[in-house]
Image: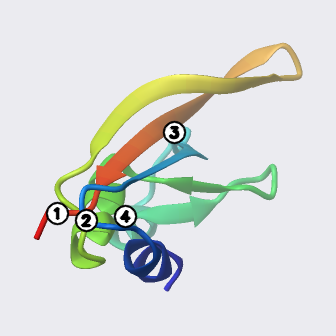
Amino acid sequence: EALAAARHALRPGGRLLFTVEAPAPPWSATDEQAGWRLQTSGRYAHDRAYLRATLQEAGFEPPDVAAIVPRIEAGLDVAGWLVSARVAAT
């Protein structure tokens, strides 16, 4: 719903940029089917393929999803994704 609302709010050619956590191993079969999971930190992590599919379903062009380190927690890098999705020009 949030992605569909963002798509509706953007003009053709507009971009949506955001970061999310990437899942830490192990990735269970249930997590893989869902494409996301709640981490022990209380934060959600999302699979790259899930992000791409969900954004395309919401009406965005195939997004760019780049691996990043959005923050350091307890002295360790937290794996994440920088997502850039563009609304198709009509």
Q: Secondary structure at mark 4?
A: helix
Label 3 neighbour load within 10 Å: few <14, some 14-19, many 20+: few
Which of the 4 image quadrants contains residue 88? bottom left
N-terminal label among 2 and 3: 2
Q: Is residue 90 above or below residue 84?
A: below
Q: Is residue 80 above or below residue 48?
A: above
Q: Which residue is mark 4?
A: 29
Question: Which of the image's four quarters has the C terminus?
Answer: bottom left
The residue at the point 36 percent across, 58 percent down is 51
The residue at the point 38 percent across, 73 percent down is 7
The image's mark for residue 12 is 2
Q: Which residue is mark 1?
A: 88
Q: Give the camera-side residue of 2 and 90.
A: 90
Q: Which residue is mark 3?
A: 25
N-terminal label among 2 and 1: 2
Q: Is residue 60 above or below residue 24?
A: below
